[in-house]
Amino acid sequence: MLDLSLPWPIGLIPIAMTAWASYGLYRAVVTRDGVTGASLVSILGLVAFIAAFTAQFVKPFINQTLALITAQFLGTAACFLLGKLLWSIQKTKPDLSLRRRPDANMFRAMGILLSFVFGIDGLYFLFPDAGKCAHFTGYMANKCAGQELLVGIHDLPIAVYFGVLLGVPALAGVSRGIWVLLFAGEAKNSVGG
């Protein structure tokens, strides 16, 4: 049976953001707008909530950092699959070929994105108890409890939620960069150039 007493593991703000993301994704599918900025943000919000919801019910026996890294990789794969779905139903498909030559800027961007992911995951690894309300007393304890009502309990689900929101876009950028590096020559050869 669900325990609906407050504070919830996933707070009211992430739930409201997920409702908005679900509507945005639904609207993109129904209107056949396809891949837009709003639909990409909607996909990310929906995937982050699904990862946090799963972490709430599964309660993995592995540590928090490994659960976060797994959620980030699975979330990146889910984002690509939902993006492919939106791309396939799009009314008009613009020519967005990935035929570019890898240059120093791409390697620099991939390095920045990878260092961002390692930094976020490293902070979760180094400070797993950061922000928990047990450390505070008095006014700060009340303030932290109020924050937990809106955002959620500082436990694995909310850490996975924000970890996926921050890490998946960076991993998607790295994945796209790797795709361009691996298949840029094949696209050029298949065109006949």
Image (cartoon, rainbow, N blue to C red):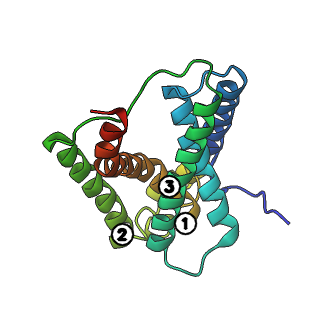
Q: Residue at x 61, y 50 (%)?
A: 49
Q: Residue at x 79, y 62 (%)?
A: 3
Q: Earlier in the sequence, mark 3 or mark 2?
A: 2
Q: Are marks 3 and 2 in contact (CB under 8 Å)?
A: no
Counting from the top left corner in percent of width and height, residue 148 is at: 57, 53
Counting from the top left corner in percent of width and height, residue 39 is at: 56, 30
| Residue 99 lies in quadrant | top left
- Asked if residue 28 shows in the view, the reply is yes
Determine which of the numbered discs, if any, sits on residue 127 in the image.
Answer: 2
Task: Single out the mark in the foreground, 3 or 1.
Answer: 1
Local crowd size for mark 2, using a 10 Å CA cut-off: few (<14), some (14–19), many (≥20): few
Quarter holding the N terminus is bottom right
Label 3 sits on a secondary structure element that is: helix
Observer-nearest of 171 and 176:
176
Q: According to the image, label 1 marks what residue?
A: 156
Counting from the top left corner in percent of width and height, residue 187 is at: 35, 40
Q: Amino acid at mark 2?
A: Phe
Q: Earlier in the sequence, mark 3 or mark 1?
A: 3
Compared with residue 79, is residue 192 higher up or lower down, i.e. above or below? above
Compared with residue 61, is residue 31 higher up or lower down, i.e. above or below? above
Local crowd size for mark 1, using a 10 Å CA cut-off: few (<14), some (14–19), many (≥20): many
Q: Earlier in the sequence, mark 2 or mark 1?
A: 2
Q: According to the image, label 3 marks what residue?
A: 144
| Residue 127 lies in quadrant | bottom left
Compared with residue 14, is residue 8 higher up or lower down, i.e. above or below? below
Question: CA separation, marks 2 and 1?
Answer: 13 Å
Q: Amino acid at mark 3?
A: Cys
Label 1 sits on a secondary structure element that is: helix
Quarter holding the C terminus is top left
Question: CA separation, marks 3 and 2?
Answer: 17 Å
Q: Residue at x 59, y 54 (%)?
A: 152
| Residue 26 lies in quadrant | top right
